[in-house]
Image: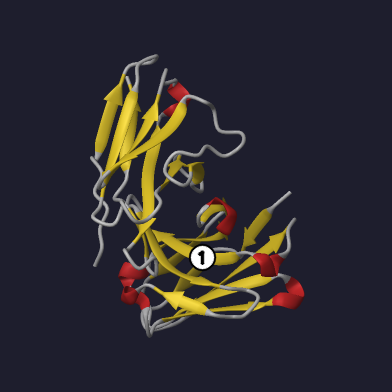
Amino acid sequence: SYELTQPPSVSVSPGQTARITCSGDALPKQYAYWYQQKPGQAPVLVIYKDSERPSGIPERFSGSSSGTTVTLTISGVQAEDEADYYCQSADSSGTYKVFGGGTKLTVL
Amino acid sequence: QVQLVQSGAEVKKPGASVKVSCKASGYTFTSYDINWVRQATGQGLEWMGWMNPNSGNTGYAQKFQGRVTMTRNTSISTAYMELSSLRSEDTAVYYCARADFWSGYSFDYWGQGTLVTVSS
């Protein structure tokens, strides 16, 4: 079955830039989405269609894509950004959706 | 405003079935797919499948095919996910999420989650 690979953890100091990667063979063909999840809460969409930001999401969140890797970048990280982040996409046919394993962002 | 409100926590014995509901409000229920995603404690998100509330068409992750059924009642704007032959590994929080075609197929609104515990 199709898989998306994320690093388990990323740590940054406040004000620095955090980059979280997600790799998958079908990413050149399928859009990627990013979700933020804080403890005890439902996930929240922060990036759609690789690099678009929903209304209400701060400008410090951005997304990019290059080949089989997509990247979520958080510029000027704040303490409130500490959370788990999941990428999501689909297999090459678009039939089956899949989530990456998640990345825990720690703000030092 | 868009809201997805799920039914309450459930405790089931192994081998039983569970049916979780997801009531939509604030938008036209039949215009957006509903997807189901689950999360075991301390684990990641796992996609289970989708349902089109207008047609009733469904698509399930291979892992759950034969055990999951997604249905809807359009008169009350409610989607359902039923999982059968429960085992301890099915203990998880189950989420419904609206899929927005206009943003690709993103899950733009989520329910609050329903904890299903499978225990003898």
- Quarter of the image for residue B79 reads bottom right
Colour treatment of the image: secondary structure
Up/down of B41 relative to B6, above or below: above
Disc 1 is placed on an element classified as strand
Q: Is residue B84 left or right of residue A56?
A: left
Depth check: give the residue in front, B35 or B7.
B35
Up/down of A54 relative to B23, above or below: above
Q: How many C-alpha atoms fall within 10 Å of the one at disc 1: few (<14), some, or many (≥20)?
A: many
Identify the residue shown where x is 44% and y is 20%.
A78
Q: Is residue B78 left or right of residue A58?
A: right
Q: Position of residue B66 (x, y in %)?
A: 38, 85
Depth check: give the residue in front, A5 or B94.
A5
Identify the residue shown where x is 24% and y is 67%.
A1
Q: Can residue A68 be seen in the rendering of this structure?
A: yes
Q: Position of residue A14 (x, y in %)?
A: 38, 15
Q: Is residue B48 left or right of residue B8?
A: left
The disc labelled 1 sits on which kind of residue? Asn
Q: Position of residue B6 (x, y in %)?
A: 61, 62
Residue that lies at the very extreme toward the top in this rendered image: A15
Depth check: give the residue in front, B115 or A48.
A48
- Quarter of the image for residue A76 reads top left
Count of picture labels: 1
Circle 1 is placed at which residue position?
Answer: B35
Identify the residue shown where x is 48% and y is 47%.
A43
Q: Can residue B111 be seen in the rendering of this structure?
A: no
* Location of the C terminus of chain B (image quadrant): bottom left
Q: Position of residue B76 (x, y in %)?
A: 74, 73
**Chain bearing mark 1:** B
